Image: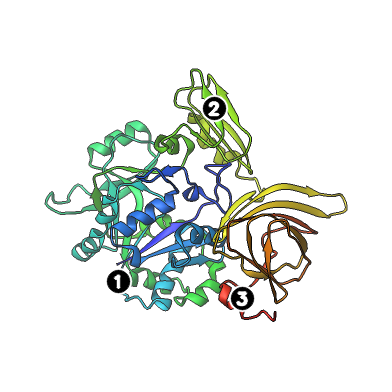
């Protein structure tokens, strides 16, 4: 059995902490049993590992999220990268071709697809192991996992079972689906043993590969990547699930939540204040999450979320917080904070002058033992000031030590990399005509490989 974790999203539902590269699953606002901060993706990966499924798991994601996945989970994680965002059907189709043509997975292998960020107990992942048996026993095209509802929610989709399903069967036959019904309708469906659709489903690899062949899409990963733009922008639910003739569902009885909005996420945050902040007076059920260096103080404001990051500041009553996705959907602001496999950076200032010249200032932190890629830029010059720490630098094949107080001039087209021996803080000032993250040509990632090109 193989598991494909879908890590997508544009990062608007938990703005301003989430952005184009740091979606909700990467926010370190949860806690481990020891009290250490962790993100949703770190929590899920830890649970998958504990359930003995780590060696069988892959993450399908968009290019902007690759660095953050490697930064939070490690560089050995198997990542399937979408050439562009095109919804869940294209993402799963690409993953299927990767398993088939690159990994050599048998066509008879069971593939389980799930979101990367469910808030569940470890028992949830042990339950997913049963999906393979359910597929084999039922002969179904698809086997879904459905959560037994605890209340008539209007926020979730429902799996409506077939009334002819035998009581002694470990699964139910699926009759239909209902997306986000009214509370009264949801209560009626629960009386009919309906299940919450948690977005987990399994199929034999052969099933999806044959569908791709029938659509005249490639089944080789390299060719599928080249033709990815041909695939329709549509969800797997609409393109495959709702068109399948034989679907069954495996009921799961346990805690399950989608922490997709500020009001649901804060239910699982153990402390009312993260970062610099004070909550005083009659401020029940209020949270402050502050990534800035300035303090935030709230007085007599109940049921409020205040979230602050370099990308912006949100102040909202919790019931209204889901509106932020719609409010921000047309925003094209560049991410002002990103985590990378080597550390993180924060944009401190950005200016664009009437003549078209741009100036951007970053604070970069490189963690000990990690290095930037060996790279050059085509559109910008950079000046680095090492604020603290020490390490080693490669600049146009020259290798030399760097330390606190050093100033480095990196002109356009200069090949450069940096490795931190201790944690390094660097102030970087960029100047050019277009200051974008895509203006990076990466030549090598591994430090040993980088050192081989040095002449001094």
- Say what secondary structure mark 3 lies in: helix
Q: How was this image coloured?
A: rainbow
Residue 14 percent coordinates (x, y): 52, 42
Residue 32 percent coordinates (x, y): 38, 46
Residue at the image point whose x is 69% and y is 81% from the top:
455
Q: Earlier in the sequence, mark 3 or mark 1?
A: 1
Residue at the image point whose x is 23% and y is 59% from the top:
130
Q: CA distance from mark 3 to mark 1?
A: 39 Å
> Marks 1 and 3: in contact by CB < 8 Å?
no
Label 1 sits on residue: 109
Residue at the extreme right of the image, as rendered = 355
Label 3 sits on residue: 450
Q: What is the quadrant of residue 242 in the picture?
A: bottom left
Quadrant holding the N terminus? bottom left
Quadrant holding the C terminus? bottom right
- Say what secondary structure mark 2 lies in: strand
- Say what secondary structure mark 1 lies in: loop
In-front residue for pair 282/275: 275
Q: CA distance from mark 1 to mark 2?
A: 53 Å
Label 2 sits on residue: 278
Q: What is the quadrant of residue 64 in the picture?
A: bottom right
In the image, 115: left or right of 149?
Answer: right
């Amino acid at each position: 059995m193989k598991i494909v974790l879908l890590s997508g999203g544009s990062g608007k539902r938990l703005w301003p902490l989430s952005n184009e590269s740091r979606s909700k699953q990467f926010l370190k606002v949860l806690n481990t049993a020891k009290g250490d901060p962790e993100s949703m993706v770190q929590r899920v990966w830890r649970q998958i590992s504990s359930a003995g499924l780590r060696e069988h798991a892959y993450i399908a994601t968009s290019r902007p999220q690759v660095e953050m996945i490697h930064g939070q989970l490690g560089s050995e994680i198997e990542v399937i990268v979408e050439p562009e965002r095109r919804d869940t059907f294209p993402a799963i189709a690409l993953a299927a071709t990767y398993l088939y043509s690159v990994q050599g997975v048998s066509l008879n292998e069971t593939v389980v697809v799930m979101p990367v960020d469910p808030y569940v107990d470890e028992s949830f992942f042990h339950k997913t192991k049963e999906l393979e048996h359910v597929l084999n026993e039922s002969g179904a095209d698809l086997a879904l996992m459905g959560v037994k509802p605890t209340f008539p929610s209007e926020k979730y989709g429902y799996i409506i079972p077939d009334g002819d399903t035998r009581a002694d069967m470990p699964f139910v036959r699926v009759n239909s689906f209902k997306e986000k019904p009214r509370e009264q309708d949801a209560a009626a469906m629960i009386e009919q043993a309906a299940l919450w659709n948690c977005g987990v489903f399994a199929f034999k690899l052969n099933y999806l590969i044959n569908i791709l062949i029938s659509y005249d899409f490639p089944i080789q990963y390299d060719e599928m990547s080249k033709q990815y733009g041909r695939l329709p922008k549509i969800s797997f639910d609409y393109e495959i699930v709702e068109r399948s003739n034989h679907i069954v569902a495996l009921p799961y009885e346990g805690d399950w939540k989608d922490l997709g909005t500020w009001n649901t996420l804060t239910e699982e945050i153990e402390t009312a204040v993260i970062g610099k902040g004070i909550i005083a007076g009659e401020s029940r059920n209020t949270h402050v999450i502050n990534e800035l260096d300035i303090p935030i103080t709230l007085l007599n404001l109940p049921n409020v979320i205040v979230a602050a990051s370099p990308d912006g500041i949100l102040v909202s009553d919790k019931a209204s917080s889901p509106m932020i996705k719609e409010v921000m959907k047309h925003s094209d602001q560049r991410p002002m904070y990103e985590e990378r496999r080597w550390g993180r950076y924060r944009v401190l200032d950005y200016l664009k002058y009437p003549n078209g010249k741009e100036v951007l200032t970053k604070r970069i932190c490189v963690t000990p033992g990690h290095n930037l890629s060996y790279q050059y830029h085509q559109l910008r010059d950079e000046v680095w000031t090492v604020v603290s720490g020490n390490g080693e630098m490669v600049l146009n094949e020259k290798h030399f030590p760097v330390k606190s107080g050093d100033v480095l001039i990196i002109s356009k087209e200069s090949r450069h990399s940096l490795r931190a021996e201790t944690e390094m803080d660097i102030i970087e000032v960029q100047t050019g005509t277009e200051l974008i993250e895509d203006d990076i040509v990466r030549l090598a990632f591994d430090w040993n490989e980088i050192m081989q090109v040095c002449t001094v």
